[in-house]
Amino acid sequence: MESIKINKLEIENVKRIKAVKIEPTASGLTIVGGNNNQGKTSVLDSIAWALGGDKFRPSQAQREGSMIPPTLHLVLSNGLVVERKGKNSSLKVTDPSGQKGGQQLLNEFVEQLALDLPKFMESSGKEKAQTLLKIIGVGDQLDVLDRKERELYNSRLAIGQIADRKEKFAKEQPYYPEAPKELISPSELIRQQQEILARNGENQKKRDRALELHAERNRLAEKVNTLKEELERYQKQLIQVDQDMNIAYKSAEDLQDESTAELEASLANIEEINRKVRANLDKDKAEEDALDYRRQYQELTEQINETRKSKTDLLQSAELPLPDLSVKDGELIYKGQQWDNMSGSDRLKVSTAIVRKLNPKCGFVLLDKLEQMDRQTLNEFGQWLEQEGLQAIATRVSTGEECSIIIEDGYVKGQEHEEVAAPQPKTTWKAGEF
């Protein structure tokens, strides 16, 4: 369906307007120029009132000093005739077949923001972005992805902070390479010491036994010397004892007592050794924790990147009003620039395109105070409007050649007009009175 535009408008006695007739260009920019306080903005307010309803009605609609109520007459490109006139400025909408309608019929194709585009342009960057996301139908999905990204980002931030603390703690811990890997138990050292002492005790018993045999040998030798009669018997015993003695000495000769000095030193230094072991264990644990948190951090980073890609894919698959228009971090982006870095022409393009997307049936927008824009910006915007088949009716404090019409004292400069006079009261004559 072709978008609807304003073909012709006639306004009388609205705010500063006395009588104005305008036929805007079907596509492109129609600039209503003039000096201050001549009625330029009144033209836009009249159109907004005529099409948007009583919520756009000026607080003081009737021209000051006029006794005649406001009259509004608009002809639209779809053949509808919109009128407001009479004491109550009642609305009448007539279609080409003569059928009548009301505000509900106008609401089908008149976009509210088209009547008040500055309201959109002055809203915050996030509000503009929300409007765009709403009309392209991805606002709810993008909200879910935004929340997911924020949650992942906060989790990653917390994990990263813990990893940093663990790494810092690990670096601050002393390390003792000579310390054993596990804590030393005093009872275990004592047990080992007791086993060594027990073995040494057995050795001592063997030594004592050898000494006892040696003493016995001496006693028997003396007895041999004194008891010749028992020589033979004792010589046999002597031989046997000598043999046992030799065996005992030979057995004791190879024995080596084990030292307990190392265990005694360990027992003496057990607290210091265990302190070093604990320090090494703490350092190892901190390094392991830091590596684990770094791994979690990396996993969250990958999830955030995947979420951001999903957002990008969602926006790229959506039907956006302009090729280079997008939303990033909740802000409108056009040609890579946020709103505050966009040129005046680009801001107008973005706003107009979004309004058209809100209601494709609405083929026009109203713009006030374009005097802030230079000629080149106006030309660029006008060319874009023509290219897109859109109509814009705007005001500008200027009487230059860029203006389509000039308003002076409530009239269109150069248009023939008659001063609208208030009706005079009828004079009733009575006989005998002068």
Image (spheres, rainbow, N blue to C red):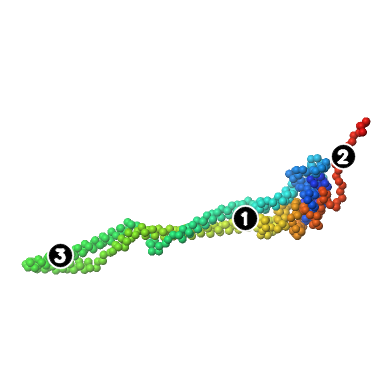
Where is 277 relative to 253, above or below? above
Q: Nearer the viewer, mark 2 or mark 3?
A: 2
Residue flagged by tag 2: what amino acid is it? Gln
Residue at the spot x=12%, y=65% of the render? 219
Q: Is residue 382 above or below residue 47?
A: below
Whether pointer 2 and pointer 3 mark residues with C-beta atoms closer than 8 Å, the reply is: no
Quarter of the image where one finds residue 431 = top right
For residue 426, side relative to residue 126 (left or right): right
> Which residue, given by chain and number where applicable, does mark 3 sit on?
215
The CA span between labels 1 and 2 is 65 Å
Q: Is residue 1 left or right of 153 when viewed as pictured?
A: right
Q: Nearer the viewer, residue 326 or 277?
A: 277
Q: What whole-number distance in Å separates the C-alpha atoms at marks 2 and 3?
A: 165 Å
* Residue 186 drawn at (x, y percent): 33, 57
Q: Earlier in the sequence, mark 3 or mark 1?
A: 3
- Image quadrant where one finds the C terminus: top right
The answer to the question of whether label 3 and label 1 lie on touching residues, with beta carbons closer than 8 A, is: no
- The dot on residue 424 is 2
Q: Which mark is residue 217?
A: none
Residue 102: x and y in percent read: 77, 43
Say the numbered circle drawn on residue 329: 1
Under mark 1, the amino acid is: Asp
Within-10-Å neighbours for mark 2: few <14, some 14–19, many 20+ = few
Q: Amino acid at mark 3?
A: Ala
Q: Residues within 10 Å of mark 3 (few under 14, many from 20)?
A: few
Q: Which residue lies at the image location 22% right of the left edge and 68% below the top edge?
A: 253
Looking at the rendered structure, the secondary structure element under dot 3 is helix
Q: Secondary structure at mark 1?
A: loop
Is residue 231 visible in the rendered image? The answer is no
**Residue in view at x 52 percent, y 54 percent:** 158
The spot of residue 99 in percent (x, y) is: 80, 44
